[in-house]
């Protein structure tokens, strides 16, 4: 007996010793991005604005269907190979599609056909998936917003918003006619128009009760449909079988702490707001008794987070500002949207394996929060980068896929297009974020619009970064620990002039001055009263010297000035080199200046640098940094996405940097290509970003690159910070 016990124990030990280690939590990573413009009909102007707003998937998970409001169409994307999505065409509609869902072989589309706010109208269109034709329409008697199907796809619920005109009486309620809820019977994807049932929602809300404006609908498995009345700050639960209201309650208010409350060109997460109306947009059931709402705000509110209620209205969990602060840590906080902050708007919920997950879409931050439903306080698992303004999402658990529809299309401003983005859940590490911030003196370090890098002397894996004029009230030198994964901002040194935050700065470059301080490159802009200059600050960030450009340069200056600064030599032999981004008035087309300044003698000089030719847009310089025998220079076009062609790292031998006097003939330097950065910019499977702004080589000889996210203004907010390995500087 004793022998057998020892044998069994030994066997257990041996089994344990060879058992595999517990696997890490699976993660979502973006695997593809589809530009909605690729679905424009043959012969259409490729510059036509497009949008992917609400999105659904077919039952086999191989086709996506999205609403494209500007083009009055729904579009299709073939994701049989999810890593290589293909355009699947589109179907034009007689009106503006506001929402879409799939029932078997049919697509059901809510379509707004109104003539005016006071004369709203709409239809439910039934589209055949195989033929991509509109088979039938049902008059639904008002302007629709959201559509949803119950679990067995026999009931369709449509929120008839009859939205208010925000230009009338400051958008105040009431503005009749009132909205309501429409229910329709569905069989095999075919809608029975004669079954239409209207659910009166008037008189329920304390805010504008006579004018309910239903926004979003969602079913649980009991055929109960939750309806958000956003402007009314109210939630209603309806029995979809009978059309009766089972419960209703105010969404209430929330107190927010540790938030940024001012549009002042600075990120300060020390403010608070009291009694903020939640005004929820999207709603999703977590189970048959609990629902989660995204508190976007649209009229008076904007609670910046999400809330979990039971269906009687009891608050089970309030996120407050926690989601927003996590987003701020990765540089996605939209300072220009301080009334409603990140604007959580869309939601999705699904079971992946053993995990019940829900996804919160922050429209103004272009981020998706992935949360695990624990039954209590949800656990934030990831923050996923999305396109600009994620509006809709669909989970496809059977394929371990998650998809976002991003509505903003900035083609008219030369910006990013609307995209559908696809993520896959699996083993591995999260590819994003690549840079996160920490706290300093108990305060969250906000960051964005990073524009230049420099090494921390004698400290491998650590680099400095600066922000540009987007944060004009908070010019800062950041210290980044690139040995961490993701890299961490561990310090923030504010730049001051006479004891206050320095104004009129557009810092585009940084280099240590050898005495614990820094030299900074300031890009001028006459419209903002910024001057082209180089600036010396001490170790406390206090400006010591500001050196304006000489008259010979000033006579020909343009806005696109110094985009980097580096130093060569030591002591009295130190020479500063600055890269001018684009041609100035005295430059031959296709050539820009590398400008020199010697502090000991106050001498200025320059050489000419040959630019690559631009097929479209313009080409210029973004950075200069010296290391070993070379000066390394980023050269790029100003194009984005599929149009981007040139994002490269070049080098010029220091021996060739022999400056001539300004005003005369300048020697032309020879350049050598070091690395094409476009593959690096595609590594996270988003669109190629425009502004590769910073490059440096650390104390160990490793190269690092950073992109400028434009302060999340007309930008997805993505900051890419990555290493490119050892650089041979000899």
Image (tube, rainbow, N blue to C red):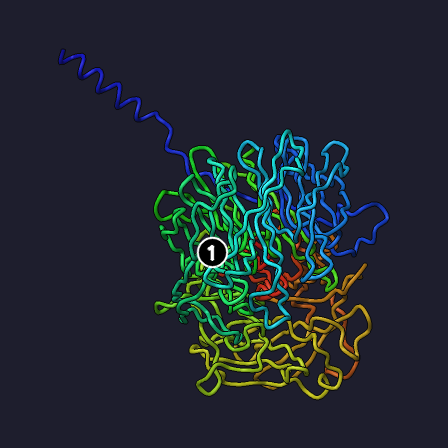
Expressed as whole percent of the image width and height from the top left, the position of residue 211 reads 55, 60
- Residue 622 as seen in the image, left or right of residue 428: right
The residue carrying mark 1 is: 204
Q: Quick check: 55 above or below 728?
A: above
The outermost residue toward the right is 43
Front residue of 237/100: it is 237
Q: Quadrant of the N terminus?
A: top left
The outermost residue toward the left is 2
Q: Can residue 312 be seen by looking at this rendering?
A: yes
Front residue of 210/700: it is 210
Expressed as whole percent of the image width and height from the top left, the position of residue 216 reads 55, 50
- Residue 219 as seen in the image, left or right of residue 185: left
Which residue is depicted at the point 67% across and 68% down?
A: 655
Which residue is depicted at the point 37% across and 32% down?
A: 21
Q: Can residue 329 be seen by looking at this rendering?
A: no
**Would you call the spot at circle 1 few (<14 residues within 10 Å), some (14-19), or many (20 or more)?**
many
Expressed as whole percent of the image width and height from the top left, the position of residue 552 reads 73, 86
Quarter where residue 130 is shown: top right
Q: Quadrant of the C terminus?
A: bottom right
Q: Quick check: 480 above or below 597?
A: above
Figure label count: 1
Quarter where residue 483 is shown: bottom left
Q: Secondary structure at mark 1?
A: loop
Expressed as whole percent of the image width and height from the top left, the position of residue 207 reads 48, 63
Front residue of 119/560: it is 119
């Amino acid at each position: 007996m004793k022998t057998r016990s020892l044998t069994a124990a030994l066997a257990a030990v041996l089994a344990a010793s060879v058992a595999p280690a517990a696997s890490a939590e699976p993660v979502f990573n973006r695997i593809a991005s589809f530009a909605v413009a690729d679905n424009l009909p043959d012969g259409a102007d490729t510059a036509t604005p497009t949008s992917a707003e609400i999105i659904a998937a077919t039952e086999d998970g191989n086709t996506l269907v999205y609403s494209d409001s500007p083009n009055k169409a729904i579009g299709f994307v073939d994701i049989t190979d999810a890593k290589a999505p293909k355009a699947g065409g589109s179907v034009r509609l007689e009106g503006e599609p506001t929402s879409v869902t799939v029932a078997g072989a049919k697509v059901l589309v809510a379509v707004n056909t109104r003539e005016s706010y006071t004369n709203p109208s709409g239809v439910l269109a039934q589209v055949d998936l195989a033929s991509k034709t509109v088979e039938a329409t049902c008059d639904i008697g008002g302007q629709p917003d959201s559509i949803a199907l119950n679990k067995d796809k026999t009931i369709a619920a449509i929120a008839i918003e009859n939205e208010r005109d925000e230009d009338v009486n400051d958008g105040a309620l009431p503005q009749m006619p009132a909205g309501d809820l429409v229910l329709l019977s569905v069989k095999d994807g075919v809608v029975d128009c004669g079954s239409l049932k209207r659910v009166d929602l008037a008189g329920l809300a304390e805010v504008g009760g006579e004018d309910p404006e239903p926004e979003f609908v969602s079913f649980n498995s009991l055929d109960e449909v939750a309806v958000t009345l956003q402007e009314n700050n109210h939630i209603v639960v309806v029995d979809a079988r009978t059309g009766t209201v089972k419960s209703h309650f105010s969404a209430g208010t929330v107190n927010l702490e540790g938030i940024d409350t001012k549009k002042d060109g600075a990120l300060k997460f020390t403010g608070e707001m009291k009694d903020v109306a939640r005004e929820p947009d999207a709603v999703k059931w977590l189970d048959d008794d609990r629902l989660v709402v995204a508190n976007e705000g649209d009229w008076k509110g904007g609670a910046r987070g999400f809330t979990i209620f039971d269906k009687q209205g009891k608050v089970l969990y309030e996120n407050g500002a926690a989601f927003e602060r996590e987003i701020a840590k990765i540089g996605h906080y939209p300072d220009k949207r301080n009334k409603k902050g990140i604007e959580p708007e869309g939601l999705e919920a699904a079971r992946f394996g053993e995990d019940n997950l829900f996804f919160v879409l922050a429209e103004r931050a272009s981020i998706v929060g992935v949360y695990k439903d624990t039954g209590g306080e949800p656990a934030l698992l990831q923050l996923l980068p999305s396109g600009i303004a994620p509006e809709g999402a669909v989970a496809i658990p059977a394929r371990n896929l998650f998809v976002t529809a991003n509505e903003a299309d900035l083609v008219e401003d030369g910006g990013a297009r609307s995209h559908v983005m696809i993520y896959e859940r699996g083993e591995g590490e999260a590819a994003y974020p690549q840079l996160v911030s920490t706290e300093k003196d108990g305060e969250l370090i906000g960051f964005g619009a990073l524009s230049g890098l420099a090494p921390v002397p004698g400290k491998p894996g650590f680099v400095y970064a600066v922000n540009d004029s987007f944060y004009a009230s908070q010019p800062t030198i950041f210290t980044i620990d690139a040995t961490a994964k993701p890299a961490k901002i561990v310090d923030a040194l504010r730049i001051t002039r006479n004891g206050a935050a320095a104004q009129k700065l557009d810092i585009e470059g940084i280099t240590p001055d050898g005495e614990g301080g820094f030299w900074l490159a300031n890009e001028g802009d006459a419209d903002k009263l910024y001057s082209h200059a180089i600036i010396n600050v001490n170790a406390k960030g206090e400006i010591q010297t500001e050196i304006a450009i000489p008259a010979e340069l000033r006579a020909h200056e343009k806005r696109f000035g110094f985009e980097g600064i580096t130093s060569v030599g030591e002591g009295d032999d130190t020479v500063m080199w600055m890269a001018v981004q684009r041609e100035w008035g005295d430059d031959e087309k296709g050539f820009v200046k590398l400008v020199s300044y010697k502090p000991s003698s106050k001498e200025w000089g320059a050489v000419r640098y040959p630019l690559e030719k631009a097929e479209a847009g313009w080409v210029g310089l973004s950075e200069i940094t010296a290391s070993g025998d070379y000066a390394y220079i980023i050269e790029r076009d100003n194009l984005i996405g599929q149009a981007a062609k040139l994002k490269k790292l070049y080098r010029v031998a220091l021996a060739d940097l022999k400056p001539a006097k300004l005003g005369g003939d300048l020697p032309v330097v020879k350049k050598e290509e070091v690395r094409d950065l476009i593959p690096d910019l595609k590594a996270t499977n988003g669109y190629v970003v425009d502004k590769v702004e910073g490059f440096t080589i650390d104390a160990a000889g490793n190269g690092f690159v950073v992109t400028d996210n434009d302060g999340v203004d007309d930008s997805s907010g993505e900051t890419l910070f990555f290493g490119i390995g050892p650089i041979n500087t000899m």
